[in-house]
Amino acid sequence: MKIRFRLIAIITLSLLSMQSFSQRRKFYISLCFGQSSMEGNARFDPQDTSGIDSRFRVLQAVDCPDKGRIKDRWYTAVPPLCRCKTGLTPADYFGRTLAAKLKKKIKIGIVNVSVAGAKIEIFEKDSYQTYLATAPGWMKNIAGEYGGSPYARLVELAKIAQKTGTIKGILLHQGESNTNDTLWTKKVNGIYDNLVKDLNLKPGKVPLLAGELVNADQGGACASMNKIIATLPDVIPNSYIISSAGCPGNRDHLHFAVEGARILGKRYGEKMLALLGYKITDPE
């Protein structure tokens, strides 16, 4: 009798494990980090908060009592997708694009930890404190919302996401504060390698999608940085550059206008779909 009960218990646990594995495979997670554009500088319009598929989810990074959101919990991905007062990010239309094309049984999850105005150094695992030591107070406050280390918070949230989903990609939009920094690709590579190690990822299966800054065709103040961003695949083979050509910028020439954020987000989504094996017939 005891042997029978043990056998039943083993079979039950095996079935539950298989079911959990199957569910994780159907929940595609993307990690997002960067500075103001990925954080969400563009002010979203009513059209950006409606018609959002419930399969598109965001893992809340910080508590937002006024929005009824609690950190570390999943919600339908109604903007803002970063912190309580941020705006539209490329992650918004990235997720919408995936939700429109992927099979209905697949969910899409976003984890977004971004810091406006910050150099890429703020995401360096072991030396971020050196950078923050001389950062302005408002930037320190943003980092404080993440518990001090934006990188550590990104990893913490990613591990929560891995309990129910599978990390399929990493989205980066950063560079304005590192304009003309020829070591930028090396620094990004270090962050990518740390994420791969700390989250037990396989580099060949987790692409890094990096977006260009406001393009020269829009008078982008930091457009020269796009030449450096373009060399990222030379350092990280499984990385891809998302063009910002034709994406409208704001009058400050640093940030994308809301329509620019939508277009850029869709391009991120189309690249991810292509990497997942979907044929894209009409890219922006």
Image (tube, grey):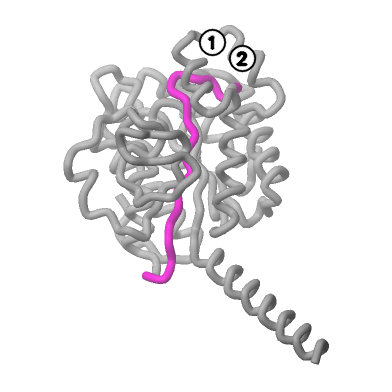
Q: Amino acid at mark 1?
A: Ala
Asked if residue 244 can be seen in this view, the reply is yes
Depicted 161 relative to depicted 6: above or below = above
Place of residue 84 in the rendered image (x, y in percent of width and height, measured from the top left): 36, 31
- At x 38%, y 50%, the residue is 75
Place of residue 11 in the rendered image (x, y in percent of width and height, measured from the top left): 70, 83
- At x 19%, y 37%, the residue is 45
- At x 30%, y 58%, the residue is 53
In the shown orientation, is residue 19 left or right of residue 45? Answer: right
Asked if residue 225 can be seen in this view, the reply is no
Q: Which residue is mark 2?
A: 131
Q: Are marks 1 and 2 in contact (CB under 8 Å)?
A: yes
Label 2 crowd (10 A; few <14 / some 14-19 / many >=20):
some
- At x 23%, y 44%, the residue is 48
- Helix, strand or loop for disc 1: loop
- Helix, strand or loop for disc 2: helix
- Magenta part of the protein: which range? 104-121
Magenta segment includes 248: no
- Circle count: 2
Q: Amino acid at mark 2?
A: Tyr
Magenta segment includes 108: yes
Label 1 crowd (10 A; few <14 / some 14-19 / many >=20):
some
- Nearest the viewer among 82 and 269 is 82
Q: Which residue is mark 1?
A: 135
